[in-house]
Structures are given as structure tokens and as C-alpha cells.
Image: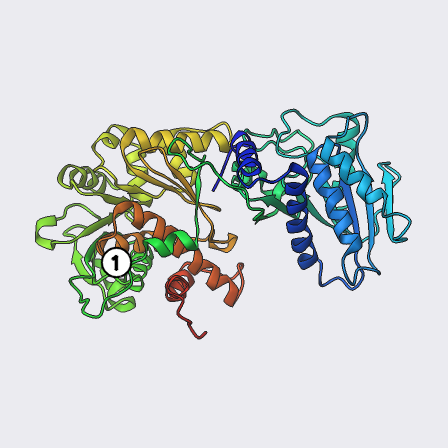
Amino acid sequence: MVLSVTQIRDSEQFTMQSEPIAPIDLMERAANALFCEIKKLSEHLPYKKYMIFCGAGNNGGDGLALARLLTTAEFSENDDVTVVKCFGTARLSQDCQTNLQRIENLLPQYPNLKIEDFSPNLVIEAGAVVVDSVFGIGLSRPLTGYFAEIVKFINKHKRTNSIFSVDVPSGLFTDVPTPSVNVVVEADRTLTFQFQKLSYLLPENSKRVGEVTVLDIGLRLPDNDSFRPIAKMIDLDLVRKLYRPAQKFDHKGSNGFGLLIAGSELMPGAAVLAAEAAMRSGIGKVIVHTTARAANVLACRLPEALLDIDANDCFSDISLEKLNVNAVAVGPGLGKSPKTVNAVKNLLNELHSPLIIDADALNILAENKTWLAYLPENSILTPHFKEFERLAGKSRDDFDRIEKLKEFSQKYGVIVILKGANSAVAFPDGRLLFNTTGNPGMATAGAGDVLTGVLLACMAKGYPTEHAALLAVWLHGRAGDFAAEKSSQESLIASDISNNLGSAFAKITGNRIAY
């Protein structure tokens, strides 16, 4: 779940009142979660040295409590823990002051514990774990002067040290864009509490937040209908609720028939990739409407697909009544010849059930924006960033793009899957979800065609359009993760994603697949 700063503050207050739990004890709970995660992440180090930069607020209090736990932990007698006070002239929060006093009381007992004031002459040993606990999620202005120097100092050691940020990299805004000129800690990993933050899911902050781990500290949310998060996450728990397992007496007809309008003389592979992905996602039958030359490639590569060959050397016409299908996808590898443009227009006029629109079909819509008004309700559009820009216009930043995404979905009554890292899915009722699967290796030609095929299968099998979109996005990303695990992200190609869809389904059902 993705919450705003205000919503997170409300959840903290609600938790403290409803459990009840004192603020200092909630801070201790957060520090324990940090301790467990940082010990796990640093367990490969034979000799551990921790440098914890602590600010004057509650984020600094978390860091001070973490330092105490690292100092007093069993088998930590050989570990060095250094607290770097980054207070400046700021007044300490009450809980930060309490945790500072607690760790100062340990100094006589633990010779490996040090507490120092920040200085640019501070020495950080190569290989030390650097913990940034200077500023929290409430920061609303750029760092300057003393605090900017602290952040620059931390970043200077990025090449030789692991940098972990507590809750948020210091200097980063969580609810609004952070200008590229702002000084921000460039964390290797951000250990955030309970909820994702919108900033962490957007490309512009990728180098600042690094890998994100969400730590459960037991925060509760008010149980009322008026509470609405910024977004939710598409994760395994969600897709398990949506997934419908195969039944003993299922047959080809009950698994649905899908029509894929794809491929051309120059791009027959797009049709192959989409059709194979549909077959590997459990569709009963896929009919590929394509050109004669593309059909020759399909017949060789995918004998399971049925072919419906266009009379011309491009997509120019189709008879939906004759084909009798449950779901339709259009776009991969089509090209944009005048006949194809006209055929897409006719398809929109003829079809009144939700349609999956990808690739060249999206680009045709972008060049004929008045046709957007005729999209069947709850159709699924799958643009990447550039395709979406052609449809909705340029964005000032990633936050603005997300707003445009929601507005576009609501305006035209369609589901939009904005493809990329943390693919975002927008719904006509204003809901937004981010995907949790996938990896950079999937930024390769044809990966989007595979997603179209998975969507087609889910729609043809009778999933509600909303469920089909969420399930397909997760499956597509998880299959890509399995493919990368087997070889590498660098060597991943689109067909590897299709080949690992079985493992992705098995992850949902809990069945084991032997590699």
C-alpha cells in the first residue's frame, strides 16, 4: 500500500491510540525491525563496522536505537558501532533525546561504541556499513549548508561502502518531485516502514532510493470507507485472491477463444511472441489474424495457433462474427499503413466489448485522438512511456505522468497499464496499483508483446477485465524474474518470459516446478 506523509502520520497516531503503545516503544519496534534487516544484509561481512548518521528528529531517534541494539547484540563484541551526531543547532525531539541518553549510558561498558559529532574530517573505513538516519519523510525543503555537507559526505563514500537509508534517503521528498539539483543521499537500499512511498516507485528517484525493503512495524489503519491510499501494490497475496485454478472438467471451450490481430511482413515475430504467451497462459484457442507472410512464420513456430489470413499484405479487414471469440487483442507488429489505420477504426466501431490495445494500435490512436472517445468501456491499453506521451502529452516529471495516467483512464473509461519498472495500472474509478514483479532485463524488444498475449488469455478465460489486468501484469513480471534467475538479466529475451510463465503460475498455486 502507498500512503502520503499525512496518512502515515495518521496511521501512527491511530496505532498508538488503539493498541495502545507509547511513541518511544513504537520507535523501539522500528529499531528492532531495522536491526534484524541490517544484520541480515551485513551477515556476509567477517568484520562489521557500522557508521550511523543520526539527525535531531525521530528519524535520528530510530538510528540511535538501532545503534544501541547493534552494540548490545549477542556475538557483536567484535563489531564497531559509531554514532555520528548530525544535530547542528536543531533541537532534539523528545524520543531522540531519550535514545541519545540511553546509548550514552552504554559508553563505559562497550569500548567498541563511539559517539562523535559530524565533521568533514571524519574517517569512514572502506567496507563499513553506513546508515543514513538524518531526515525522515516529513522533509519539505531542500537541504543546504551544514546538512547538505553531511549528505555530500555520505555520498562520497558510496563506492567503498554500503549505504542504507532509514525510512527515506535524507533530502528526498516523498509526496512531491525532488528537483535533480537537490542534495539527496544516494542509498544502496532504503529500509522503509510499513508502507511504500510514491517517490520510491518512480524512475526519477531510482538512484536515490536503490533497492527498497518495506519493514513491518505493526502500524494500523483506521477501518473506515473514507480512507483511500494513494495506490496499492500488485503482490502475490493479491493475485492469489484473483487467480482461479483449473477445474477437472475444463475443456478448450471453457478456457476461452482469443483473437490476436498482430504481425506483418516486417514484424511477424510480434505475433509469434504474443500468441505463444497466450497459449502458455492457459487459453483454450488463439486465432491469429495476420498477413500471409507472417502466417508462414507462425505456422512453423507455433503450430498450436489457428490462422486467419488477411486478404492484403497488412491488416485491412476482419469479420468478428465469423470468428466467434471471447476476447480480442490488437497491435503487436501491425505497422501503420493507411489500410491498417482504417481497419483499426472499423474495429473500434464494430466491437463493443473490452479490447486489448498495444503497440502500433496505440500509435494509430495517438495520431487519431478523436477515436479515443469510441474505445469500448474497460478496454485495456498497454503503453510504454513514449507511447503514453503520444497519447496524453508530455509530462513535467514522473509525478505529473502519474496524474496524467489517472486522468486519461478516468476520461476515457479504460484501464491503462503503463509499462516499465513498477508498472502502474490505472482504473476508471481513480484507483492506481503498482506492480511488484519484473526486472531491468525485461527492457527488451518483444516483452510487451508477451504481456499482450497473457492479457488475451486472461480475458478469454473469463476473468473480469480488472482482474485480468492485475493478474497478467504480475505473471508477466514474475516470469521475467524467473528467467533472469536462471541465466541473467543481461541475457534475457522476450521468449524467455513466455517460457517461464509456467513457473509464475506455479508460484501462485504453490506447486513446485523443477528447473
The secondary structure type at the circle numbered 1 is helix
Tell me: residue 240, above or below residue 246.
above
Q: Which residue corresponds to mark 1? A: 294
Determine which quarter of the picture holds residue 253: bottom left
Query: Is residue 12 left or right of 405 when viewed as pictured?
Result: right
Q: Is residue 62 left or right of residue 118?
A: left
User: Label 1 crowding class (10 Å Cα cut-off): few <14, some 14-19, many 20+?
Assistant: many
Question: Front-most of 174 and 224?
Answer: 224
**Residue 511 appears in which quarter of the rendering?**
bottom left
Instruction: Using residue 467 as the reference point, say whether residue 306 is left or right of it.
Output: left
Q: Residue at x 30, y 28 (%)?
A: 411
Q: Position of residue 12 (x, y in %)?
A: 57, 36
Q: Is residue 65 left or right of residue 288?
A: right
Q: Which quadrant is home to the C terminus?
A: bottom left
45 or 275, which is in the foreground? 45
192 vs 323: above or below: above
Q: Position of residue 325 (x, y in %)?
A: 15, 54
Give the residue at x 41% y 58%: 494
Q: Position of residue 233 (x, y in %)?
A: 44, 45
Place of residue 77 in the rendered image (x, y in percent of width and height, measured from the top left): 83, 60
Tell me how the rendering is colored.
rainbow
Q: Is residue 264 visible?
A: no
